[in-house]
Image (spheres, rainbow, N blue to C red):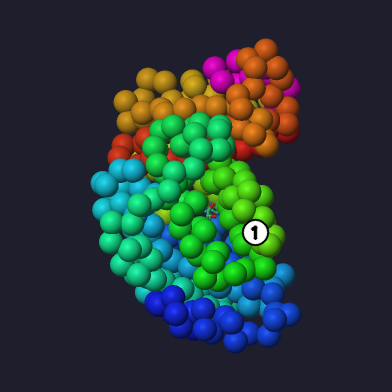
């Protein structure tokens, strides 16, 4: 695997590839797990060259404590990427990615950027869009791979590609889960033993809503909330049942079939998010 830490050499290497060669791109923030690696494998199956990036993007963290404690395991990540046959790893330094005092553009694409994660993490998607635009402009991928675990992020990236007419095919990979159902996440390593046991309730709530997808949105909402009630280690941010495409909330008296349920909850000091299509 070739490793680039600077933008110039990465661009030079990629522009020397034959024009008909397809490039698959998997952007990550590292601390890789099987969910990330499944995206790399999907890219390898459909492209001549697979590029992964590892960059803990400071502009998408609205919480400095979260940024400071974000797990960083670069040497292990490199071994894992080698094992799945990733061709190129790009891990740039923040001071080359961002000019000092660079102003971060603000994007308001309605519910897609401003509901849910956008409401609870102000500026988060401005940071995501900014870094993804930069990475896309350097890598110029044929296809780019994102995980459905970050459902709203997928919607934001789809909107980005449409609005800017980017010639990139988007592929959204299924969420990989631990044996008990918890969605794999780099942040899971920060859960205590007790928190880890409780964390499974997030996926349990979603699986139950999926199994009962004919129920009304109000009923689904209520029954998912019971998974978090009376447990002081949980601090619920949102349970939402929304339209798959535009993320607007489903009316309480509508059956949930075909909508998507999303949950964000603090479990101790770790913020967990997960989502599921209800059908
Ligand atoms: P991150 O490093 O958390 O920014 O994630 C990098 C990419 O991996 C994003 O597109 C995520 O949606 C995706 N991803 C994260 N967790 C999972 C998972 N459990 N299963 C599949 N994809 C995931």
For residue 109, say whether it is visible: yes
- Residue 247 in percent (x, y) is at 61, 32
Q: Name which residue lies at 44% across and 75% down.
A: 7
- Residue 140 in percent (x, y) is at 59, 69
In the visual, does 262 lie left or right of 21?
left
Is disc 1 surrounded by few (<14), some (14 to 19) or many (20+) residues within 10 Å?
Answer: some
Q: Name which residue lies at 41% across and 27% down.
A: 236
Number of marks in the rendered image: 1
Is disc 1's CB within 8 Å of ligand 1?
A: no
Q: Name which residue lies at 69% across and 75% down.
A: 22
Residue found farthest to the top: 253
- Residue 240 in percent (x, y) is at 55, 27
For residue 201, say whether it is visible: no
**What is the quadrant of residue 41 in the picture?**
bottom right
In the visual, does 266 lie left or right of 210?
left
Please state which of residues 42 and 106 is positioned toward the viewer in this rendering. Answer: 106
| SS category of the residue bearing label 1 | loop
Quarter occupied by the C terminus:
top right
**What is the quadrant of residue 217 in the picture?**
top right
- 91, above or below 144, in the image: below
| Magenta stretch secondary structure, dominant | helix
Q: Is residue 172 magenta?
A: no
Tell me where the magenta segment starts and ends, as one range. 213-222
- Residue 80 in percent (x, y) is at 48, 72
User: Which residue is the site of mark 1?
Assistant: 166
- 13, above or below 57, in the image: below
Q: Name which residue lies at 46% across and 37% down.
A: 117
- 34, above or below 224, in the image: below
């Amino acid at each position: 695997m070739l490793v680039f830490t600077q933008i110039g050499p990465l661009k030079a290497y990629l522009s020397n590839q034959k024009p008909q060669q397809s490039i698959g791109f998997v952007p990550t923030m590292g601390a890789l797990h099987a969910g990330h690696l499944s995206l790399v494998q999907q890219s390898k199956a459909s492209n001549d060259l697979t590029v992964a990036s590892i960059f803990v993007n400071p502009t998408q963290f609205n919480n400095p404590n979260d940024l400071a404690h974000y797990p960083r395991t670069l040497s292990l990540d490199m071994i894992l990427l080698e094992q799945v046959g990733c061709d190129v790893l790009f891990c740039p330094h923040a001071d080359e990615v961002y000019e000092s005092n660079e102003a971060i553009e603000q994007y308001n694409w309605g519910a897609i950027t401003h509901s849910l994660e956008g409401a609870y993490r102000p500026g988060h998607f401005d940071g995501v869009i900014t870094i993804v635009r930069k990475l896309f402009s350097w890598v110029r991928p044929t296809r780019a791979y994102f995980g459905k675990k970050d459902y709203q992020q997928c919607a934001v990236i789809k909107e980005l590609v449409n609005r800017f007419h980017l010639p990139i095919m988007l592929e959204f990979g299924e969420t990989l889960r631990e044996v008990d159902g918890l969605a794999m996440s780099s942040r899971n390593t920060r859960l205590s033993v007790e928190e880890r046991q409780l964390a499974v309730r997030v996926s349990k709530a979603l699986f139950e809503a999926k199994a009962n997808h004919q129920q009304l949105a109000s009923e689904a909402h209520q029954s998912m909330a019971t998974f978090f009630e009376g447990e002081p280690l949980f601090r619920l941010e949102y349970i939402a049942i929304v339209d798959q495409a535009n993320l607007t909330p489903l009316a309480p008296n509508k059956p949930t079939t075909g909508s998507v349920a999303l949950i964000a909850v603090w479990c101790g000091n770790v913020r967990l998010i997960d989502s599921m299509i209800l059908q």
